[in-house]
Amino acid sequence: MISKEEAEEKLLKIFYDVKLDHHYKKKPTHTNINMFEETKNSNRLGHYYKIEDDELVIAMWANSYEHGIPYIASKMAKDSAKHYRKDFFSKHMNLFVLSHLIIPIITMSVGLLTYQDFPPIAIIINILGSCTLIYFIILAFKWKKRTLIRLKELFKNTGIVLSEEKSRKYLKLDFLDGGALSFMQGIIFLISIMSWAVFI
């Protein structure tokens, strides 16, 4: 088991190893775990980090400081991948979040409303909506893949050992995999099926 001070040193090193200082344009000189709540429930893992002046402020909910480090590190790896300047796809994740639900819903709903009066236009609209949905799904997979690569690079540099299964578990908690979003995605696929079924 490592102490709070050792955990703070490791987390500061991780912050720089993953090059988040380039994104935040700040260079914290020390870390402060200002909130720690012990929990045995692995499903209640939580975290946040922020930079205040020259301090990296961290909060974690975990079994121990050692247990919480990979979780916060995965958050840093995700943010690093998201803002990785050489990765074309990672720059467009905000667009993905805003558009991968809205655009298909709008286009396919319009397709459903116009298929009786303007079948050719409805087909074109459906194709656009379907292509948009497929594009953003590919974009999300590429972002997740890039993040896993970044996570492996990060842990390799810091000496933290984390299995592929654990990596995916930690990352899943950080990605847009919530129940509300999954429900919306289900609605989109239902609309997509309906928008094409009317032509059969």
Image (cartoon, rainbow, N blue to C red):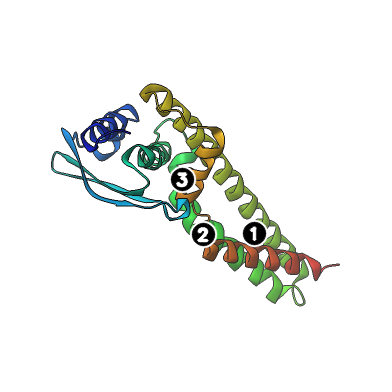
What residue sits right under mark 3 in the picture?
A: 92
Q: Earlier in the sequence, mark 3 or mark 2?
A: 3
Decide: is 165 above or below 179: above
What is the C-alpha distance between the residues marked 1 and 3?
A: 18 Å
Determine whether the residue tagged by mark 3 lies in a helix, strand or loop: helix
Residue density around tag 1, few if under 14, some if 14–19, many if 20 or more, within 10 Å: many
| Mark closest to the chain's N terminus, 1 or 3 | 3
Q: Nearer the viewer, residue 14 or 103?
A: 14
Disc 3 from disc 2: Cα separation: 20 Å
Of circles 1 and 2, the one toward us is 2
Instruction: Say which quarter of the image contains residue 28.
Output: top left
Which of the 4 quarters of the picture holds residue 26? top left
Q: Nearer the viewer, mark 3 or mark 2?
A: 2
Q: Quadrant of residue 2?
A: top left
Closer to us: 132 or 22 = 22
Q: Quadrant of the N terminus?
A: top left
User: The disc labelled 2 sits on which kind of residue?
Assistant: Gly
Q: Tags 1 and 3 in contact by the CB under 8 Å rule?
A: no
Query: Which one is earlier in the sequence, the residue at label 1 or at label 2?
Result: 1
Q: Which kind of residue does numbered mark 1 sit on? A: Gly
Image side of residue 32 versus residue 132, left or right? left
138 sits to left or right of 36: right
Residue at 37% from the left image edge and 46% from the top image edge:
63
User: Which mark lies nearer to you, 1 or 3?
Assistant: 3
Residue 178: mark in rendering:
2
Please report the residue visible at 75 percent of the width from the left and 77 percent of the height from the top: 117
Name the amino acid, label 3: His
Query: Going by the image, does 178 lie left or right of 68?
Result: right
Of helix, strand and loop, which one carries label 2?
loop
